[in-house]
Amino acid sequence: MKLYRFLTGPDDASFCHKVTAALNQGWSLHGPPAYAFNADTQHMLCGQAVVKEVEGTDYRPEMKLSEQ
């Protein structure tokens, strides 16, 4: 089964750590990162899609993808 997640966060080191943790858990980058400016908070936000192939289990909508 192929899993998909879209990681988001502020444009700072915490976002880089989030993506790094996912990569070290077997996830792979999927496409380029995305950036957006939040005019209310005056901060940049980042997003990065990641995918992972998991054998021996079937997809269920209630599964927590971050724990796979």
Image: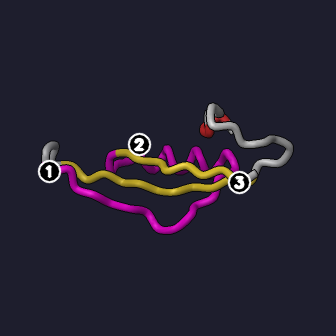
Whether 37 is drawn above or below 18: the answer is below
Q: Specify the color scheme.
A: secondary structure
- Residue lying at the far right in this picture: please name it: 56
Precedes in sequence: disc 2 or disc 3: 3
Task: Judge from the rendering whether residue 49 lies leftward or rightward of residue 38; answer left or right.
Answer: right
Residue pointed to by mark 2: 14
Residue pointed to by mark 3: 2
Task: Judge from the rendering whether residue 24 lies leftward or rightward of residue 6; answer left or right.
Answer: right
The residues tagged by marks 2 and 3 sit, at their Cα atoms, a distance apart of 26 Å
Q: Which residues lie in the magenta part?
A: 10-39
Q: The residue tagged with tag 1: helix, strand or loop?
A: loop
Is residue 21 located in the magenta-colored stretch of the structure?
A: yes
Residue pointed to by mark 1: 39
Precedes in sequence: disc 1 or disc 2: 2
Whether 41 is drawn above or below 28: the answer is above
Front residue of 36 and 62: 62
Give percent across and percent down for residue 55.
83, 48
Q: The residue tagged with tag 3: helix, strand or loop?
A: strand
Give percent across and percent down for residue 62.
62, 31
At 50% from the left and 44% from the top, the residue drawn is 18
Mark 2 belongs to which amino acid? Ser
Check whether the beta carbons of the residues at disc 2 and disc 3 lie within 8 A of each other: no
